[in-house]
Amino acid sequence: MRKLIICLALIFVGSLHAQTIKFTIEGVIQKPKNAKFAYLVSDAPVAGKPDLFLVGPIEGDHFLLSATSSLEGKLLRKGFIFLDERADMTLAEVKARIKQKVWFVGGSANLKSIFLEDIKLDIENPYNIASAKIISGGIYLQQTEDAKKALKERKFLNFIKQNADSPVALMEVGNLVRYANIPDFFKDSDFRSPAELYGALSDRLRQTDEAKAIKREIDEPLKK
């Protein structure tokens, strides 16, 4: 039994450091209107690697985009999708719209922020896909929504404990570290500090490089 537990732990840690992932992103569009093509763009490029940029046709009310992506030692990789009537949009054009603040990743209605994972989305309006709902898959994306709700309802520590093995839990802890030095910032929360949240993460997750980097951020003010 002990050998089995050790093997499972090694498999888990190995999966966290997997260098590539295969994923499929699907969408069902209730009213396609003029949308004819679906695009997927990686939110942050991997140094020395080509940017992930895919385009596929919308067939009837459905599209499907499949790819393999490099994680380069990271636990998760973000991206976004959008729909358009054109098939010839370029990555340079997309980057220009973001740089010129015509589009805001995470803020524009026509862009849907996602993680690169298997997911199927229900899209009611092709011009407002930011509000698309998860039909299946999308485990990490759903966890980010759950985290927002838990923080609002002051149940965030419980969320971290329930998802202690998830990279999303680690990411959410890291997002709060910047507020640690603001007096009374967490006084109305169900936790005292990011350090308490970090301590609720699994031992296996804390072994990762990303977790260790967050721990250094948490510990740095204590050394001053």
Image: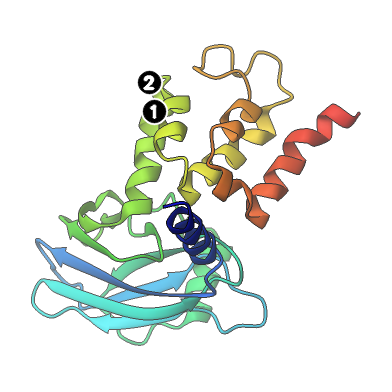
Instruction: Report the residue marked by disc 1.
Output: 150
Residue 82: x and y, percent?
33, 67
Residue at horizontal 39 percent and vertical 28 percent from the top: 150
> Label 2, label 1: how many angstroms apart (C-alpha)?
5 Å
Q: Does 88 sit left or right of 217 as displayed? A: left
The residue nearer to you, when weighing 200 against 90, is: 200
Q: Is residue 210 above or below residue 67?
A: above
The residue nearer to you, when weighing 89 against 51, is: 51
Q: Amino acid at mark 2?
A: Glu
Q: Amino acid at mark 1?
A: Ala
Residue at horizontal 56 percent and vertical 66 percent from the top: 17
Q: Given contact means CB atoms under 8 Å apart, are the residues at marks 2 and 1 in contact?
A: yes
Q: Is residue 128 above or below residue 67?
A: above
Q: Is residue 190 above or below residue 52?
A: above
Q: Residues within 10 Å of mark 1 (few under 14, many from 20)?
A: some
**SS under mark 2:** loop
**SS under mark 1:** helix
Residue 34: x and y, percent?
17, 72
Residue 83: x and y, percent?
28, 70
Instruction: Report the residue marked by disc 2.
Output: 153
